[in-house]
Amino acid sequence: MNEAPASPRPPEHPGHPARPASAAQSGIWFNESLTDCGAVHNIAFTVRLDGDLDIPALRRACAAVVRTHWQLGCAVQDRAGVPHLVPAPVQPPELAVEPERPDALRAYTAAPFDLARGPLFRPVLQVIGPRAHRLLLNVHHIVFDGLSMETFVTDLAARYEAETAGGDPGPPVPVPEEPAGAEEERIAAKLPAARAYWAHHPVGDDDVVLPGLERPAEGVSDGATVEFRLPDELRARLRPLAERIGVSRFELLTAAFHAVLFRYGNKTPVTALDLGTRTPGQSRHIGVHVNELPFASAPEGGTPFEDFARAVRAGLRELYEVREVPLGRTGARFRPGVALAPVTMSYRRMGPAPRFGGLDASVEWQISNNTARNALRVELTDSADGFDVMIQYPPDAMTREGAESVGRHWRAVLDHVTAAPATPLADLPLLAGDERERLLTGWNDTARDYPARTVPELIAEHAARTPDAVAVVHADRRLTYAELDADAARLAARLHGKGIGKGALVAVRASRSERLLVALLGILKAGAAYVPLDAEYPGERLKYVMEDSRAVVELTDADLEPSADDGPAAPAAAGPPAPDDLAYVIYTSGSTGRPKGVQIEHRSLTNLLHSVEELLGARPADTWLALTSVSFDISGLELFLPLITGATVVVASESQTRDGAELGALAARHAVTHVQATPTGWAMLLDSGFDAPGVTALVGGEALPLAFARRLRPTVARLVNVYGPTETTIWSTSQEIGPAPERVTIGRPLANTRTYVLDERLSPVPPGVPGDLYIAGAGLARGYVGRPDLDGERFPPGPYGPAGSRMYRTGDRVRHRPDGQLEFLGRSDDQIKLRGYRIELGEIESRLLAADGVDRSAVAVRDGRLVGYHVGGADPGGLRRELAAALPAYMVPEVFVALDALPTTPNGKLDRAALPEPPESAAAASAGADSPLEAVREIWCEVLRLPTLGDTEDLFDLGGHSITMTQISTRILERLDVDVPLSAYFDEPTVRGIAAVVADLQEAQ
């Protein structure tokens, strides 16, 4: 190793005056102005040099390459809103030499550049050993791209050889630049074609479905990486396949990735692609000669992959024709940013490492800068040494397991199509055998062997074993197990006397008292099934239920009082009901407004009761509070589970169920150990001061927000989140919420229950990918009353269970967590599309509930506006700021409405349809002559070169783009002393909208 004094720093670039930034450079500069980009634009790579390295010669070679490529010595200067490249005030540093440190690479790549000051190139030489060195190179993307790496290394190697060969290598010769204005001429020539192209091609949604993507990811954030190398055997099969299909390797890879996105549920997959824009004369240029453009495909499930790949090729060839035109110049509606789609992809082919005289050289072309842009970035480097893949993702929005599975699924598709390219897209396998087995079988290993006895039999056993134990309490009245069983037997005998027995339906419209239990149990003992009626429902609905169910009789309070005509209790003549007999029929709201009767058999009811008994460790010493309307199916758990376990049930009156304070007092008076309620019901209890550290709390019927779980959990001994549709018998899954919850899921399936997360073709989706929840197993209802058409729709055959099995399509969207827990994402019909964005209302409601001063929350769309409703003393301005910090702009409600209480249905659930209309929005900025409105209008006309301009004309429709925005903002700052953030132009792209922003900022000054 030859060490000598360093050569002097290179002089400033002569003959290189300030030049306007290119289109690509302007876009990068605009993004840096728009937000803190950190190190997202840093391009880092390394050159490993083994042998006797001449460090001074390498220093001279590095300095010469910088002088050859003048942009490496530049900075960026803002001139009236237009960026220019100028010689940097501080020239590139000499090649620093330092010992290798474990943390050096990460710190080196993460260090941001100062565009205004420069330099934008940073070299460091690490000493690994006596004859081993690593050259670390970090360059800002505004003067560098992927092909620049190869050019730089090639030029550096050639200059190093010249420096070490002896003699004078001569001064470096700068690479000539193309004439000023040449790029603008090319863009202008292609602009009509580009506008025509983007008028007929989708830019794409700002959302994407990916495994483990837990929230929308926009902009720059700290990033993590998943890196792997394609197996050489697979890589070798790519070229023959591409030639056979008639596509390039890049087009093949893009098609395979779009096929994966399609299988995740993206109907129109979009990836932003880095497309090269170098002209033949720029082949040796170092600089940024790429244009990122979104590419959308249109896959269909039945299309063979090879045909889809050809369609992708055709689509890309259309895009190549307009690749030089920045998207912002075309009038296409999009929001500029560090990435033009949630998923971006780059592909570069690199030659072998160049020869450094006397040294063994190897290049690592792909170094992570530890940032993430939007949801996912996939970088593909196809070099002489191998095919490397780096997936960058935001760990605060996406799980590592999800990012790893993207790479795994993409490899699986490539592996399959190289052997069977005619496979339809919908049949391309994403899941390996073990992953598929875990989804279908491993996480559904719930089999239990419960006694084949029905509820009347189980209660009768306790009546015989502990006849004097208290079974039911209401007000000051009690029924022992013996009394309850005897009274129910007498009622059963009366029903039999009227010819009512096995297979009959008996309607029950009774007050909440101990006699309600007598009614339900008596009907079951008679072998009939009960149909609960809520007296608060409209008469028309009650009439419909009676007629549709064909109930043979209706029992009211008068029918349930003990009668002198009743004889002694006796066993029912027909014996106990069989497991496959009906236990009850519950009427639920229909999507078309027509209620539907769900038929539940005894076997399903007892399976649920035994499953929850096992889950909770239920025992005779327990006391349950019954507070749910009997017309709501979850009442079956709180009424019957205590009775089949020898415990006590305390029945709250109608008035008590509506008063949190009275319910709390009732629970305290009877030392209640178990309470079940919806989140809305629990909120009523907590608002009234409920605090019962000995109570086991079950919460279900609505999604449980994390913020509310954190509020409820400290007030109870145990908190169990339960989930299940009426059609699968009350509850189907559960999760125990720990003392310090970080996440709420609906957990795993209960005993003898199987859950499947499937796509439209009923194929299992990978963990982390949203899908439709289907439930199978012992809890399935017999079907709907008189609705065979609906039975076929909602209870399709079960492809993954025993022969002849069925499953229930819940209409709920869920995904599997890596540990098998099910995460509830919302109803399919609660997922809305607003201004092109897919929005889950439940996610906004959870964020709103977590805000300070919010006790209850709801979100709805009214007249095309997203409206947030809240109960509590929160300030609307504070809510807007708090939500804006946590959610994308399109998910922040436009209006916040404070309510004294949220409207609820008789079952205690949120009644979203009853949320009131919001007040009219405030008037826009004043139109006075000296108002911000006229000042902003004048500036817009100047920048856009228009004689006049309306209040509501759209900036993007007028041809505005990133530089236009910066010029407008610069003039507003100069004349009105207000610094309008560039993001405002995407939210309010009109004169009136920006004037309102200016007025708000002036008021805040």
Image (tube, rainbow, N blue to C red):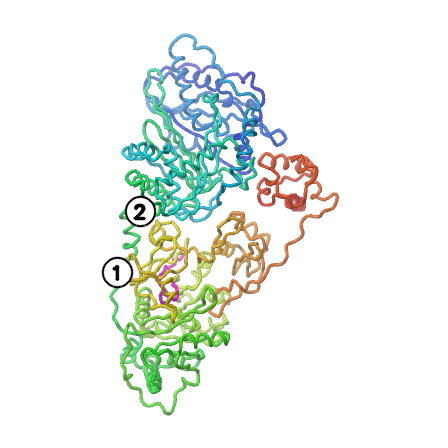
Can residue 114 be seen here? The reply is no
Q: Is residue 476 magenta?
A: no
> What segment carries the magenta color?
724-741
Specify the amino acid type for callout 2.
Answer: Leu
Q: Quadrant of residue 805?
A: bottom left
Can residue 6 be seen here? The reply is yes
Residue extending farthest to the top is 167
Label 2: state its secondary structure: loop
* Residue at image point 43% right, 72% down: 631
The image quadrant where one finds the N terminus is top left
797 over 413 or under it: above or below: below
Residue underneath mark 1: 802
- Counting from the top left corner in percent of width and height, residue 51 is at 32, 19
Counting residues from the N terminus, which is met first, the one under dot 1 or under dot 2? 2
Q: Quadrant of residue 998?
A: top right
> Mark 1 packing: few (<14 Cα in 10 Å), some, or many (20+)?
few
Label 1: state its secondary structure: loop
Classify residue 2 as left or right of residue 175.
Answer: left
Residue extending farthest to the bottom is 564
Residue underneath mark 2: 431
Specify the amino acid type for callout 1.
Answer: Pro
